[in-house]
Amino acid sequence: MTDFVSQAMGPPTRPAATQPSPAQKAAAEEFEAVFVAQMLKATGFGAPRSSLGGGAGEALFASLLIDSYAQALVDRGGLGLSDAIARQMDVQ
């Protein structure tokens, strides 16, 4: 019976694949950069070293450096999240 049902229904249909708009792609890349920056911060990357004792200024610039590293990673292809996110933005 299962074969009959699958033959009668045919293959599952999916909406036609469309390319995300430039705005969707940009928003997805920005989201991926924020995500990567948070992941880097969670691992302790760029944490102020106790030997330098730079205080609040060092913490601020370390955060900006991490954000720059995350954006550079995304610009070079990233983790591949932005493509998946942009496609999901287009699905209704």
Image (cartoon, rainbow, N blue to C red):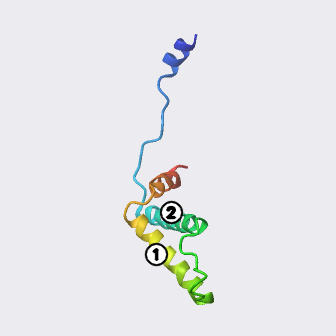
Q: Which residue is mark 1?
A: 68
Please tell me which residue is depicted at 55% across the width and 78% down the height of the picture.
63
Q: Nearer the viewer, residue 41 or 27?
A: 41
Where residue 25 sits: x, y (%)? 44, 62
Mark pair 2, 1: CA separation: 13 Å
Q: Which residue is mark 2?
A: 32
Residues packed near mark 2 inside 10 Å, few (<14), some (14 to 19) or many (20 plus): many
Q: Quadrant of residue 52?
A: bottom right
Q: Nearer the viewer, residue 65 or 92?
A: 65
Q: Quadrant of the N terminus?
A: top right
Question: In the image, is residue 54 above or below residue 64?
Answer: below
Where residue 92 sits: x, y (%)? 55, 49
Q: Nearer the viewer, residue 24 or 34?
A: 34
Residues packed near mark 1 inside 10 Å, few (<14), some (14 to 19) or many (20 plus): some
- Amino acid identity at mark 1: Ser
Question: In the image, is residue 27 above or below residue 53?
Answer: above
* Label 2 SS: helix
Where residue 67 sits: x, y (%)? 50, 74
Number of marks: 2
Where residue 59 sits: x, y (%)? 59, 83
Q: Nearer the viewer, residue 58 or 73?
A: 58
**Drawn side of residue 5 relative to residue 73, left or right:** right
Given the current orientation, which residue lies at the most extreme front position?
Answer: 51
